[in-house]
Structures are given as structure tokens and as C-alpha cells.
Amino acid sequence: MTGIGDGVELGAQAARSRALAVLRIRSRALAVALLPAAAAVILLAGGSTGHLVGGGWDAARWVVSVLALLVLSAAAAVALVVARSRPAVTPTVAVAEESAPDLYRMVRDLADRLDVPAPSAIALTPDCDSWLEDRNHPAHGPPPAEDHDDVAGPGRPAHRRSAAAPVLVIGSPFLWWMRVGELRAVLAPVVAGTGPSAHPDIAAARRFIRGLDAAVAATSAVGRGPSARAVGAGLGWVSRLLLRSCRVHAAEMERGVAVAAAERAQAVDYGLRIVAQEQVGLAYAGWDRLLTRVALPAWRMGRWPSRLDVGVVAALTELSRRDRLAEGFASRLGERPACDLLEEPGVMDESVSLLAARLFHGGPAETGPDWAPVGWDEYAEEVVDRTWRTDAARLHRVLDTLGVRRAAEDAAPGTDGPTLSRVLDHLATTPPDNPPPARASATEAETDTDTDTAPAPVPETETGPAPDTAPTPDDLAAPHAHTPALPTTPTPDDDDDLAGTTARGAALAAGLSAQLAREEARAQVPGATTPPPPFGTAGGPTAPDTALWDDRALPLLPLQPPRTGREILTAHITAMVCCAAMDTAGAAPGLDWLDGPSLLVNGVRTTDLGPHVRSLVETGDPGPLRAWLAELGVRPEKPVRLV
């Protein structure tokens, strides 16, 4: 029994009426397509019986017959595209029943209590949300080989179904942060949605809308030739017209399904669900913070944290320690976590972490020398230290390009390496009206670089600047036909962002932005992403979800917009300061679960470095930063180790 039309779930009745409205639109479109054919049949029948004779009727028969043939061909093409287009599917990690029998048992028990069909499968997604997803399209592969007609298992009420039930998609942070009872309460209204979804009218309306949406996407991607683009434009126009006609009814149908599911789920763990909703918001805040502050720096360094879900628990635990409003949440950690419902939570966490790196950063699908997993115990050395030293090396390379001296004329011997003083002196000094010869030579070098004749600057080594040597092929190789030189002045797009900085700061920020853009372009290998499988095929047995979505446009969900020139300059100066503190004052790299990479001085995280760096960037005043360095015993004139 699905519960449709039982008088209690009024939302289900509203959803069914809206589904019928969608199906009526489909029927009207079919009737419009058949109307010319019906007229042609009448004219042909009238001519064969001798009733409609004459030259005018003969011409009308030819015109209407040709028009009917064209309309029927167009309608068949639209129907074929709608039927065969691959509907959009959320990238997920499939959870086999053998790897999570307790989780499947909990979901089936929940479906029994709600008197609805149990979901056909369970999948995890790196997001703080849960929903049902229909994957019955032929392009999504055949149904599971196991006998899941009686999905409730032996000895339980059978939930018979003619088609596969939707897949239950669960946000992976919920499994690690929530307790078992909280997860069951949160999933109750989601699982209750399988009842309305099983109704034939609602299922047919959803299939029609998903087919139209997929057809619009498929016709928009057509780019073979002028004729193919013209045909695709026509098919896309018809699909968009039908989709716009169904928009209001589809939205109201889904709203009715949600209302029906919520009404049915009120009898299951209602009080606990109110408490669990607080954990949903907390998990979302911790997950967002972990991705943007902790995971993103690692992804940029070619490392992907392999235990993101464990990290969100640590981040939320740290939040509960700092925020008195969240103190009560830490006491929940003594209860059984929902991840215990998985047989191997570590393996599942690793798979979800790799999928998160692909979705939010666009990383490769498999590990390699330049894309390796990193554990939380190795994060400080593998990510934080390497990030700071890489940024510091890039900063000095750009300073070399700008013609900045490595050391002052009265500097002591052995201090001509990459030092923090070089950065401070350059940003603190106002450029003179007549540039020195070094500046002029740098400008000439940039002109030569623009013609691809001058060697690229060589990065410094641990012992100091590298000698003048010929550039390697990698240094001269460009991702495209031409690589522009490092700009010494900000572009018009950066004027607003760099308006509050000094002239030298703006030039340095522009140079760093250009250098970063070239490095990112050089790292992009054409064809690195895996092309989608042929139309109508399914994925392999080991990773069934990889065939359900197109990964040619990664990242699908970028976490942050591109950094501005001021942000890039501030990050590089901060990295240089941290390198000097580590090499001359005994500081160490660290990981803060809420703020990301942190500098530890005597085991304590420093929190007051940012304002001093911003003062240098915005006003060119190194005084506050020099005082901060002197207080910690950092020697800016000493060379630092770079990568």
C-alpha cells in the first residue's frame, strides 16, 4: 500500500493531480503532432471514395501529407531524444548491502514502520543532505542482480514493486557526525517519499520531466556541423517549450510529495528529529569549513585528505570546545555513531574523500605521483610546510623577474639567498622617479620573454640562488601557442582590488597572479578526464556510479571563486613569514581544524599574524610586522629553505 488517496496524506492527492496535469501536457503535445496526420488521412480517404475530388483537393492532399510527414518526423525525433537522453545523476559512492548490512536493515525497518517501499539501494555523497534519486533509466544500467522484490528481507512484510524503487542518497558527514538514532530520525521523511514515488502517475510524470531536462542538455551539447546544430536547436526549442509548460505543475507535484512524506514521517521519532535537525546545521557548517580551510590547500598541492569525514568530526569537536553554545554536542560522542553501521567505514570514507576532491577541485579519478592521499597525521608536513615553501619560492621567482636585488649592498656575505628582508624592503620602499638599472634590465628581460627568446627564471635552492643555467624544456614549454610575460602592473580587472595597495605591491600581486595562472595551465593535461561511456551503457562492476555522470567539466561544484590579486599577495607574504619563523625561530607547521594551516610557536597557534601582513600589503608599512618578528625572535635577514 502506497498511501496515495487515503484521505490523510492530502499532499499525495495534490501531487497526483499535478502529475496528471503534466501527463495531460504530454498528451496534448502528442495530439498536436498527430493533427496534420489525421487531416491527411481524411483528405486521402475522401479522394479514394470520390467525395473530395478536383485540383484544389489534390493540391491540399499533397501539402497536408508532406506537412504531416514532416511533423511526424520531428515528433519522432523529439520523442527519441527524450527517451534516449541520459538524465542527470548525482555523483555518489555506491554502498553495497554486503558492506553495510546494518544500514540496510535500519532503512528497511524504517520503511516497514512507515508502510512504504524500501529504497532499492543506498549511496553516499560528499554533501550535507539526503534525498531519493530515480535511476531507472536504461542508460543507468540494469537493476541489481540480487532478488530485491522482497526488499524487506526474510520474515518481514514484502514490498512488491513493478519497477526499481529510488536510490537513497545519504550525505556522508551525517554518518560520521550523527548518532544512529539521529540518522534514523533524519532519514524518516526521506524514506517516506518512496510511497508517493511508487504511484504510476507520479513516476510517469517524473520520467517525462527528467527526459525533457536531459534532452535540453543533450541538444545544447551538439557541435558537429551546421546542419547538426540546426537540428539540435530545433529539438532543443521544442524540449524547452514543453519543459516550461510543465514547470509549475512539476514544482507543485514535488511539493505535494514532500508534504505527504513529512505527514507520514511524523509518527516516527518526531521528538528526536527536532534535535537531529540541529545536528544537520552544525554538520553543514563544519563540513563547509573543513573543505574550504583544510581540504582545499591540500588539493592545490596535489594531495587529497583520505579521511574527510573523520576530519569533520574533529572540526565539530573543536568547535564544541571553543563555543559554549556547542558544549552539549560533544557529550553525544559517547553514543554509537552512525558510521558503525558500515562494515569498513575507513574504506568508504576514502572513496567519498576522493569523490569530494573530484567534485570540488577537479582532481583525477585515480591516485598517482602528483595526486596522492594524505593522512591527517601527515598533513602538517606534506601540505602545510610544502605549501608555504612553494609559495615563498614563487614569490622570490617573481621578485627576480621584477629585478629586485637579493640583498642590500651593505649586507653581510652569505645573506644573498631568499630572505624575508628582501620582501619587506621591496614593499616598504617607495619606487623612485628614475628606476635603477636593475629595473630597466628587468623590463628588457620581460620584452625578450614576450618573444619567447629569454630563459625563464631559475628557482632558488636551499643554499641560495641558482647559477645562470639554460632553462629546461619544462620551463620553456607553454600549454598553448604563446605564454605572456609576467605583467608588472595590474590589469584593469584588478584595479578595484589593488586600489588600496602600493604601486610595488600591485606589481608584485600582478606578477604572482600571472605566474599562478601559467602554472595551473601547465598542469592541465588535455584529455586527463575520463570520457563518458557510450550512450546507453553502464559502468563496470567495481565502480558502477562512474558511468552515471559526465566528468568532462570538473570541478562541478567549485568551492571558492578565483582569488584576487591582493589575496594572492597576502597569502605569499604570509607563507614567507612562516618559512622564516620555522627556519630561524623554531616554529612548526600545524593544522587547525577550523582555520586550516597554522603556525605553531612553542606549541601554541599564532592568531595575530594576519593584520600585520595586511598592513604591509595595503600601506607599505613594515613596522608592525617587524615588531611581531622581533618579539618571536625571527631573523628576517637569514635565508630560508625553499622547494
Image: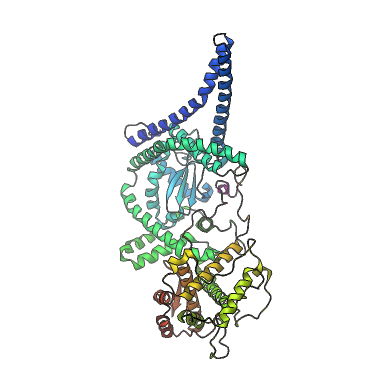
In the rendered view, does 271 fall on the left or right side of 106? left
Q: Residue at x 45, y 50 (%)?
A: 170
Q: Residue 51 at x, y = what percent?
A: 54, 9
Q: Residue furthest front?
A: 434
Q: Is residue 559 visible?
A: yes
The answer to if 19 sits in the magenta stretch is no
Colour scheme of the picture: rainbow
Q: Residue at x 46, y 82 (%)?
A: 429
Q: Main secondary structure of the magenta part?
A: loop
Magenta span: 539-556
The quadrant of the image that shows the N terminus is top left
The quadrant of the image that shows the C terminus is bottom right
How many numbered tags mark residues here?
A: 0
In the rendered view, does 7 fall on the left or right side of 87? left
Q: Residue furthest top?
A: 50
Q: Residue 35 at x, y = what percent?
A: 50, 23
Q: Is residue 58 above or below residue 616?
A: above
Q: Quadrant of residue 303?
A: bottom right
Q: Residue 541 at x, y = what percent?
A: 60, 47
Q: Nearer the viewer, residue 170 or 211?
A: 211
Q: Quadrant of residue 515?
A: bottom right
Q: Residue at x 60, y 81 (%)?
A: 465
Q: Residue 168 at x, y = what percent?
A: 46, 45
Q: Nearer the viewer, residue 328 or 134?
A: 134
Q: Is residue 536 visible?
A: no
Q: Nearer the viewer, residue 427 or 440?
A: 440
The answer to if 541 sits in the magenta stretch is yes
